[in-house]
Structures are given as structure tokens and as C-alpha cells.
Image (tube, rainbow, N blue to C red):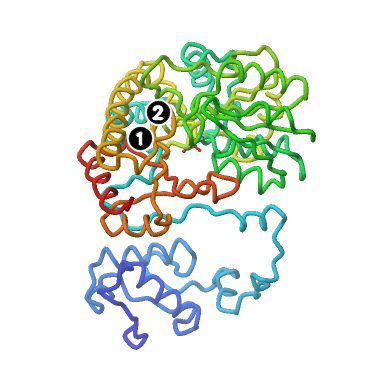
């Protein structure tokens, strides 16, 4: 082995046992170690290379399990006489794939390139207003969640199996149906609740199931960019209908002369303006959808957080018809990495949604579904929401007060006293990039609201300020910096 010149680098980040494994494997594949050749004992090799015996044992075990080495009882360890074919072929150059530029993407794949997905997070800023809608993670009852997860883990081996029903764990669907009936006035049976991996998957499934290329989709303008992208890459033609202080402007919707397949709305807390769709408009929208045979997709993403008044009941609960598909998420009331959301679907669509969910990913993770059912049924969700409603109201108040105090008439705050972010318009001649860059220098991160607008120019000077995961000092300091940056 000495003259095999095994190259091991003690300063490398690759563990030594991995390096040793790779060196011996390469020596076998290149023929420097011949088949049938005796290998030194682990003790001897460890001594020669100045390694611990455990390190060598680890590498040998791996090589043995992959068939590069074999042991002969009472004799020792040898290079395998017959190496697995596939492994030998690894030395020959792989069949070269077509260069990426020659691989033709589908229309869906190509359309993906046209949307601006968020960049990966960079360095953590000191004060981050850009994560609008991010819950206060340090307030989440993580100990309770851990306990429920571990209880679910120990429940039964059935939790490891493929699902009984792709639409989700029955007790969770029942718990959500109860919660929605009581808290959101949604009309539903547990069988109509489909558990999905966040609202994003709900939107994706609905787009696949109901939209063909060229179908028209009405979007609130401004609206939720991530929903727009889903419809866009699905090949839908997007029609923008403006939003005012009472939500979607119904006269403009009714004035459309072309047939519409689907209308996406956030009626209880319009994203991003915060407007609430008024009752007359809700009724008008439902009537229009029924007359025209249009699907209403109601995204009820953060309506638990209203601070002045009682929650606004869901649009879905105002109708007996099948025109509304309702989407909810646990990203806001719990935490987004949970990737747990739900759809409430009309009875006639249950089977097709179940088939779609099965084909896409079988089912959402069962362990989390068990824990979540317990989290709701034991009252933890309700008490967490109650606590967060008080905290977020305080933080939003602090943000509004700080903006008013430090920026005065250089800012307009748009929207109701609700939700997890505020849409603001800064009155200044500076352009958005300048403001963002200068804020960054002060350790403050901002996000422009331009991408929410179909015509991005309408979003000039507008920013989404998230405040729910910032304490009062951070909010005040952040706004103070903004006041120094923004020139009247
Ligand atoms: C309008 C809207 N819907 C839904 C969501 C949540 O998405 P998800 O459930 O995929 O985390 C967000 C998040 O910011 C949102 O703004």
C-alpha cells in the first residue's frame, strides 16, 4: 500500500474516512490495486497513514458493502475478484449528454424562465422589513410542537406507510373543517378538505386541473405575485382588475366581454393593499361567477389577524353553490417551513383533486399531519393565534406610529389595521433602487411592491413592510433610518 501514494489531506473539509475510501476505490478502478490482492489489516494501515483505526474501519466497511473488497474468514481482506460491472464501467467516460442548450424545454419549463422568483437569501440584514408575512418564530411554542411530533413518531408504524387517502389524515381534515366552520364561517364537510403542501401547492393543483393554455384568469391588481406566476406558466391569459378601498372593483369585472375561467381573490385581506372586499361586492362577485360559470379561487391566507374588529367571514360561506374553491395555510398562523395548507373543494371535485394529489406527491407528510391535528385539537393553535393577534397588533401599531412620527407626509400607509405587513408609498424623487441600496447600507432591508402590479410602474415608490417578526426597537430604529434616507 505504501507505494500507492494515498493522498489524504488533513486540512480538507472532507472527512478522512471518505478520502481514504475514495483513494482506495480509485486505486482499484485504475488497476493499481489488482483484484485478489491482499489489503493491509486495518490496524497496519492506520499505523502507516497515521490515522485512527476507526477511520480505516469505516472506509473498509464502505468498500466491503459496495463490493470493492471482500473478506475471507481467517485469511484477511482482499480486493474483490469480481468487481460489479457498473463500478468497472465508471472508469470509462460517461456517455456525453446533449449539451443543456440542446435540451428543449416544455412550454411550462420555458415559461418558468420568464418569472422573477425570489433570489436565495443573502447576508442577514440587521432590520429586515422585506419578509412581509413572516411570523414571530421565537414566539412559536416549539416545545409543544416537538412533543407532538415525537408523540406522532411513536404512534404506530402505519405512519411510515403510503397514505390511506391522498387528501390527508382524517383527524386533521376533521379538525380543519371544525376550525373553518367556527372561525371562518366556511361551509364544509371534512371530506371536502384536502391537505396540501402550503397555498402554493393548492394554487398549482388548481391551475393544472382547471386551466388550459389561453384560458383567462382574472387577477386582483395589485395582487399576489406567486399566484400570478403559477397561472402565467400554466399558459393562462391574465386579466388585471383593479382594487380600491373596498377590494376588487366589480364594475370592471362585470364589464369584461370575454369569458373568464377563474378569478383569484384575497377578499378578507387583499394582498397587498389590505382592503376588505365589501359585502355588496362579495354578493355581486358570487352572482357574477354563478351567471358566467367562473371558478372563484379564494385565498384566505392571513385573515386570523384582524386587530380592530372581528374576523371577516369567508366568501365561500356566503354561497351554497360550487363556484368557490377555498385555500388556507398554516404558514402564517404557525410557520412557513411546515408547508401545510388546505383546500376546501366542492363535493363534485373531491375525486379529481385526490387523483391529482396522488400523482403529484402521494400525500403531504403524515408525521406533521398527526402532530398538527393534535396541535389544533388540544387548543394550542387557537391560543397561539390569540397571543399572536395581540403581539402583531402591537407591532403594526408601532410601525404605523413610527412611520407617521418620522416620515410625516413623506409616507402614505395603505390598507386596514390588519394582517402581517403594511403597504406604504414613499413620497420622494428617489427611485426604488436608490432607496433599497441606501437602506441596505444602514442594515435595513426593504422590498419593493412593484412585482405585485401587472404594470410594475404603478408600484413605483411602494414598499411592503413586514413587521411581525421585528420587535418594537427594531421597527423604530428601522423607520428612523428610512427617515434619514428619504428626501422630501
Ligand atoms: C396572498 C398569499 N397567499 C398565500 C401565502 C402563503 O403561501 P404558502 O402557504 O405557500 O406558504 C402568502 C405568503 O406570503 C400570501 O401572501
Give coordinates of residue 94: x percent, y percent.
Answer: 61, 75
Real-space Cα distance between discs 1 and 2? 7 Å
Q: Nearer the viewer, residue 382 or 34?
A: 382
Callouts 1 and 2 close, C-beta under 8 Å: yes
As drawn, 143 above or below 62: above
Task: Name the residue at 55% across, 39% down.
Answer: 222
Residue 87 picture quarter: bottom right
Query: Which residue is under mark 2?
Result: 333
Query: Which residue is under mark 1?
Result: 135
Examine the rendering and report whether any part of residue 479 can be seen: yes
Residue extending farthest right: 258
Mark 1: give few (<14), some (14-19) or many (20+) Cα within 10 Å: many
Which image quadrant: the N terminus? bottom left
Q: Is mark 1 within 8 Å of ligand 1?
A: no
Task: Say what secondary structure mark 1 lies in.
Answer: loop
116 left or right, relative to 19: right
Marking on residue 85? none
Q: Nearer the viewer, residue 258 or 372?
A: 258
Amino acid at each position: 500500500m505504501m507505494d500507492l501514494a494515498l493522498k489524504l489531506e488533513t486540512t480538507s473539509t472532507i472527512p478522512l474516512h471518505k478520502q481514504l475510501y475514495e483513494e482506495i476505490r480509485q486505486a482499484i478502478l485504475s488497476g493499481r490495486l489488482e483484484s485478489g490482492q491482499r489489503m493491509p489489516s486495518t490496524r497496519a494501515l492506520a499505523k502507516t497513514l497515521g490515522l485512527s483505526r476507526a477511520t480505516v474501519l469505516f472506509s473498509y466497511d464502505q468498500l466491503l458493502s459496495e463490493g470493492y473488497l471482500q473478506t475471507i474468514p481467517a485469511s484477511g481482506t482482499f480486493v474483490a475478484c469480481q468487481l460489479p460491472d457498473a463500478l468497472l464501467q465508471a472508469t470509462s467516460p460517461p456517455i456525453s449528454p446533449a449539451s443543456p442548450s440542446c435540451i428543449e424545454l416544455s412550454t411550462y419549463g420555458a415559461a418558468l424562465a420568464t418569472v422573477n422568483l425570489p433570489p436565495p437569501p443573502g447576508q442577514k440584514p440587521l432590520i429586515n422589513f422585506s419578509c412581509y408575512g413572516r411570523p414571530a418564530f421565537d414566539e412559536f411554542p416549539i416545545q409543544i410542537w416537538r412533543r407532538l411530533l415525537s408523540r406522532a413518531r411513536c404512534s404506530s408504524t402505519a405512519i411510515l406507510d403510503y397514505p390511506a387517502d391522498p387528501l390527508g389524515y382524517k383527524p386533521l381534515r376533521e379538525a380543519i373543517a371544525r376550525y373553518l366552520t367556527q372561525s371562518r364561517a366556511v361551509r364544509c364537510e371534512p371530506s371536502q378538505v384536502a391537505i396540501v403542501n402550503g397555498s402554493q401547492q393548492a394554487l398549482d393543483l388548481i391551475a393544472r386541473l382547471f386551466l388550459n393554455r389561453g384560458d383567462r384568469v382574472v387577477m386582483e391588481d395589485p395582487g399576489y405575485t406567486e399566484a400570478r406566476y403559477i397561472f402565467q406558466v400554466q399558459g393562462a391569459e391574465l386579466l388585471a382588475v383593479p382594487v380600491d378601498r373596498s377590494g376588487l372593483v366589480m364594475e370592471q369585472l362585470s364589464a369584461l366581454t370575454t369569458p373568464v375561467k377563474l378569478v383569484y381573490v384575497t377578499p378578507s385581506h387583499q394582498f397587498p393593499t389590505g382592503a376588505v372586499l365589501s359585502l355588496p361586492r362579495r354578493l355581486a362577485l358570487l352572482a357574477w361567477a354563478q351567471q358566467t360559470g367562473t371558478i372563484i379561487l379564494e385565498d384566505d391566507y392571513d385573515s386570523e389577524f384582524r386587530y380592530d374588529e372581528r374576523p371577516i367571514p369567508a366568501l365561500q360561506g356566503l354561497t351554497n353553490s360550487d363556484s368557490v374553491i377555498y385555500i388556507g395555510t398554516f404558514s402564517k398562523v404557525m410557520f412557513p417551513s411546515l408547508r401545510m395548507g388546505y383546500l376546501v373543494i366542492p363535493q363534485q371535485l373531491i375525486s379529481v383533486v385526490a387523483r391529482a394529489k396522488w400523482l403529484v406527491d402521494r400525500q403531504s407528510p403524515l408525521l406533521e399531519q398527526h402532530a398538527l391535528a393534535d396541535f389544533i385539537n388540544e387548543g394550542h393553535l387557537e391560543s397561539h393565534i390569540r397571543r399572536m393577534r395581540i403581539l402583531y397588533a402591537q407591532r403594526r401599531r408601532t410601525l404605523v406610529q413610527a412611520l407617521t412620527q418620522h416620515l410625516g407626509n413623506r409616507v402614505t400607509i395603505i390598507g386596514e389595521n390588519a394582517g402581517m405587513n403594511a403597504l406604504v408609498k414613499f413620497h420622494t424623487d428617489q427611485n426604488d433602487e436608490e432607496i433599497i441600496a441606501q437602506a441596505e447600507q444602514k442594515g435595513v432591508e426593504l422590498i419593493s411592491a412593484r412585482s405585485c402590479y401587472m404594470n410594475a410602474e404603478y408600484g413605483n415608490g411602494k414598499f411592503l413592510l413586514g413587521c411581525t417578526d421585528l420587535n418594537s426597537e427594531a421597527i423604530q430604529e428601522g423607520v428612523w433610518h428610512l427617515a434619514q434616507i428619504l428626501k422630501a
